[in-house]
Image: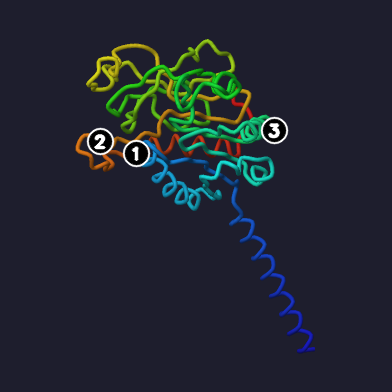
Amino acid sequence: MKPFRKLGNLLLSLCLLVACSATNAQVNKPKFHVIAFYTAKNDQAHISFVHEANKWFPLMAKKYHFAYDSTSNWSNMNAEFLSHYQVVLFLDTRPDDPAQRIAFQKYMENGGGWIGFHFSAFALTPSDFPANWDWYHNTFLGSGQYVSNTWRPTSAILRVEDKHHPVTKGLPTLWKSQPNEWYRWEKDLRLNPDITILLAIDSTSFPLGTGPKQNEIWYSGYYPVVWSNKNYKMVYMNMGHNDIDYEHHTNKDLSHTFDNALEDKLIINSLMWVGEGKKTAK
């Protein structure tokens, strides 16, 4: 009987090994896959943010169990490539090729997730980034063209506008951001029923910016900085412009976006929601 007992023990061990391997594979399987597109040219503040993001997100991927890839090849913005990812990030710019734009729109309309940072929403006619993508800037983002910005990059007191949205979970009503160049937009997002404003600049931030030009300092007004469109799994956040030492021509980083526990939580909340959450959070 001993040979049969040994064989039984061996089979039991093999079954346990297979079961453990399957369990480990399930545990280690990423919850979702993220692809970040970037350009990282011309503006050192945006380049700095992209480099920082491509170091920070892989660390968060290990911690929160998602997979992260990045590419500066915008020709990858096609249906076959995007089919391997549940979340797309625009770290600085946007696609300009018509075919790439169509592929991105279809990806979003089919339930894909997206987070855009800072310059990814920029559009101004005339400029190198003209307002020539109506669906993206007017329907998807809802903001229209860029109008103006603060200068220098300055921290702001941000106010949570929707406390029940998954993106703002665990954030205090008021908190201080990292330094950033803040944008003002053509359209009033409060008037758009498809837009959920998640965070805005609190009035205690004013005056915001230091100039030297007076129009670069904001003294009043309503400025949304993070919002979502109810028809898509998307979040836009105006953060993504590090402070840089331009004055002394060193181009050294004077601030980092991913150096603030609450701002990091906002980004992770956003990523987990668009990666795993439902299409809308009304």
Mark 3 or mark 1, whichever is nearer to me: 1
Q: Which mark sits nearer the N-terminus, 3 or 2? A: 3
Tell me: 6 left or right of 74: right
Q: Are marks 1 and 2 in contact (CB under 8 Å)?
A: yes
Q: Which residue is nearer to you in this view: 261 or 20?
A: 261
Q: Which residue is mark 1?
A: 44
**Residue 89 location in percent, x, y?**
53, 38
Instruction: Please tell me how crowded label 1 is: few (under 14), some (14-19), or many (20+) other residues with Cα within 10 Å.
Output: some
The quadrant holding residue 87 is top right
Quarter of the image containing the C terminus?
A: top right
Identify the secondary structure beneath mark 1.
helix
**Residue 135 location in percent, x, y?**
61, 22
Q: Which residue is mark 2?
A: 246
The amino acid marked with disc number 2 is Tyr
Query: Which residue is at 36% across, 33% downward?
Result: 241
**Residue 158 location in percent, x, y?**
37, 24
Query: Which residue is at 34% across, 39% downward?
Result: 44
The image shows residue 161, relative to residue 171, as above or below, that is: above
The quadrant holding residue 47 is top left
The amino acid marked with disc number 3 is Asn
User: Which mark is on residue 110?
Assistant: 3
The amino acid marked with disc number 1 is Gln
